[in-house]
Every structure is written in C-alpha cells, then in structure tokens.
Image (cartoon, rainbow, N blue to C red):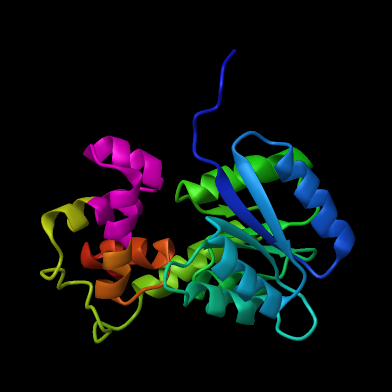
Amino acid sequence: MLYDLRPPVRVLLVDDEELVRTALHRILDSADAVSVAAACDGPDAVAAARRHAPDVVLLDIDMPGAGGLDVLRELRALPDPPVVAMLTALDRADHVERALRDGASGFLLKTTEPRFFVDAVRLLAAGGVICTPPGSAAVLGRCTRSALAAPAAAPAAADDLGGLTGRERDVLALIAAGLSNADIATHLGMGVTTVKTHIGALKRKLAVTSRVGLAAVVHRAAGGGDRG
C-alpha cells in the first residue's frame, strides 16, 4: 500500500455563505494531504488563522462587515502570515489589482471547476501565484508594470541591492523567473522552509508585500522599467 508522505497543506476557508463553505470544504477535505478549517466572517477569519496557522487562506472578497480586502491586510500582518487567495463571484479588475498590491497570491472565481481548487491550494502552498478570472492576467501584468515604474526613492531602491546576501540574490532571481518555493529549493539545494525564510527577509529589506513586488524589483534593477 502506498502512503502520501507529504505534510498536509493546512487550508482555511473564509466565506459568509454556508453553501460555499460546505462545498469547498468537501472538495478540499476529500483530497490527500489537505486539512481544512473554516470561518464565516472577517473577525472569525483572523482568530481562526491565529488558532490553526494555515498555509493557505481562501478568502471571500465580498463579506458583510469587514470585507475580504480589509481582512487580507490583517492576515498578511500576522507574525507568520499565510498565503492568501481571494474568492469572488465576479471578475472585477479593481478588486484583483488591489488584492495583488496588498499581498494576495491568487484570485479564484467561485465558479472555477471544483477539482481545480485542490491543485490551486497546493500551488499556492508551494509559493506559486494563481488567478482564474479571465481579466486577471492583464491586471497582473499591469501591477508588475506599475511596480517597475515605481520611483527610485522607494525604501529599497531597485538599483541598490547591496544589502542582500548572495543567497538572497539567488532566491530573488528565481522568484523573478517564476519558480515556486519548491522549485527554488530544488534548484539551490536547500529546504523549502529556508526558501521561505529568505523570501521573508527579501520582503522586509526591499519593502514589498508580494512575489509580484519582488519580481518587479529584479526587472527594475535590470533596467526593465526603461522599456515601454
């Protein structure tokens, strides 16, 4: 008999609609190496994140009271913040852009094919970025171009990466190339936990909140912002 020896991906579902929570809970809970908890609103989400320490949070963007975008900032401000992907029933470019800028790593339509959610949470836990709304790719590109055009007076100027260690530079380059945490770990011969530690240090040193921002720093440093 074969056993799945992967550590489980801890997922927190946050949605005020019970039907949505129940459906996603069943989909994810039926998958191997995935454990699931749920919350019904913003305050409950933050408390549940502290309690369960999820790897990935699937967060409804449109909830009464504290909306998903406000909760996103609270989750990303936790001492060991989870990866957050926003759940939505609508493809709204303004929501996608704001969520990406505030540190979201994904954007998933609730109408996404059910089996795709399992692959999505695994990709997110591995350090990937995922967006299923049709307009999201264009928004992601716009966010990156905007970051490339950020003024050199930013807290960590793109042309001055002298404060980074050699290993941090290696990790940063591979993030810009689009590799997941697992792929970076394999490429550099280190553990995924070590990769995450380097990424946390990079975000602090370069004053960015997401992988999109880190990738933009690399391209700006290389002169990418000078190409229309």
Is residue 94 visible in the rendered image? The answer is no
Magenta-span inclusion, residue 195: yes
Identify which residue is drawn at 23% across, 72% down.
158
Q: Residue at x 35, y 76 (%)?
A: 149
Quadrant location, the C terminus: bottom left
Q: Is residue 57 above or below residue 226?
A: above
Tell me if residue 33 can be seen.
Answer: yes
Give the residue displayed 29% in from the left and 73% down from the top. 204
Residue extending farthest to the right is 19
**Residue sitting at the far top:** 1
Tell me how many marks there are: 0
Q: Is residue 17 located in the magenta-colored stretch of the structure?
A: no
Position of the N terminus, as image quadrant, is top right
Image height of 169 relative to 71, above or below: above
Residue nearer the viewer, 10 or 15: 10
Where residue 86 sits: x, y (%)?
A: 65, 64
The answer to which of 49 and 209 lies nearer the viewer is: 49
Could you tell me which residue is drawn at 76 percent across and 86 percent down? 65
Task: Please state the extent of the stretch shown in magenta in the rendering.
Answer: 171-199
| Residue 30 drawn at (x, y percent) | 74, 37
Residue 165 vertical position relative to residue 150 in the rendered view, above or below: above
**Residue 20 horizontal/vertical position (percent):** 84, 58
92 sits to left or right of 151 = right
The reply, left or right, for residue 106 in relation to residue 114 is left
Image position of 69 with respect to 49: above or below: below
Q: Nearer the viewer, residue 15 or 46?
A: 46
* Quadrant of res 217: bottom left
Magenta stretch, overall SS: helix
**The quadrant where residue 114 appears:** top right
Residue 94 picture location, percent across and down: 64, 76
